[in-house]
């Protein structure tokens, strides 16, 4: 396992569309391991492969309920809406309010290639949407309805 370098806003790899994973080989499993380690080392709740420079549809998330590994994730259902403050490991020091669905259902594959379904609300719904956006070259700042400055961030802590 290894902590990988996190690409930051301005790096064009973050704006590319990632490719589906057809074969889950050893390289993908090492990628999943490294992404989890990188996410935890950076105290993040999610990380998408393009953030470590790999244009493949691979995501890791942990909102405090354990590690979720997603290969080829797709939102198959969404309902409601919520507005909450987001940040991104690729855009340090920037935060803002984004409108997301209140609940999403995501289908993906796990590292064994089995189909899994994740039903997420609250922070998990936000993380699923945020990370899947990364796979399509979309950053949360594209969707911010109000940026939050540092003073306000401190107050919210
Ligand atoms: Co992000």
Image (cartoon, rainbow, N blue to C red):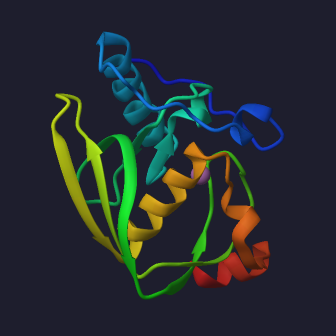
Q: Nearer the viewer, residue 150 or 76?
A: 76
Q: How many marks?
A: 0
Q: In this picture, is 152 found above or below 44?
A: below
Judge whether residue 18 can be spotted in this image: yes
Q: Residue at x 59, y 48 (%)?
A: 134
Picture quadrant where residue 117 is located: bottom left
Q: Residue at x 45, y 50 (%)?
A: 46
Q: Nearer the viewer, residue 42 or 25?
A: 25
Query: In this image, 138 relative to 37: left or right?
Result: right
Q: Residue at x 54, y 24 (%)?
A: 4
Q: Name the residue at the right extreme.
A: 10
Q: In this picture, is 81 found above or below 148?
A: below
Q: Residue 92: percent from the left, percent from the top?
A: 71, 51
Picture quadrant where residue 98 is located: bottom right
Q: Quadrant of the N terminus?
A: top left
Q: Residue 26: percent from the left, percent from the top?
A: 30, 11
Q: Name the residue at the top extreme.
A: 26
Q: Nearer the viewer, residue 100 or 9?
A: 100
Q: In this picture, is 40 found above or below 56?
A: below
Q: Quadrant of the C terminus?
A: bottom right
Judge whether residue 95 can be spotted in this image: no
Q: Residue at x 38, y 35 (%)?
A: 36
Q: Residue 125: percent from the left, percent from the top?
A: 39, 69
Query: In this image, 145 relative to 41: left or right?
Result: right
């Amino acid at each position: 396992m290894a902590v990988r370098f996190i690409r930051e806003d301005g790096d064009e790899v973050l704006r590319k569309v990632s490719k589906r994973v057809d074969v889950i080989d050893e390289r993908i499993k090492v990628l999943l391991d490294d992404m989890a380690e990188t996410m935890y080392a950076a105290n993040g709740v999610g990380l998408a492969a393009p953030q470590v420079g790999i244009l493949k549809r691979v995501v890791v998330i942990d909102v405090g309920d354990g590690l979720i590994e997603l290969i080829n994730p797709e939102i198959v259902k969404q309902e409601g809406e919520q507005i909450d403050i987001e940040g991104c490991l690729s855009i340090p020091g920037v935060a803002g309010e984004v409108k997301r669905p209140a609940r999403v259902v995501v289908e993906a594959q796990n590292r064994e290639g089995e189909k899994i379904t994740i039903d997420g609300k609250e922070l998990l719904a936000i993380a699923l949407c945020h990370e899947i956006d990364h796979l399509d070259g979309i950053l949360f700042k594209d969707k911010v309805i109000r940026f939050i400055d540092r003073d306000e961030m401190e107050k919210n802590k």
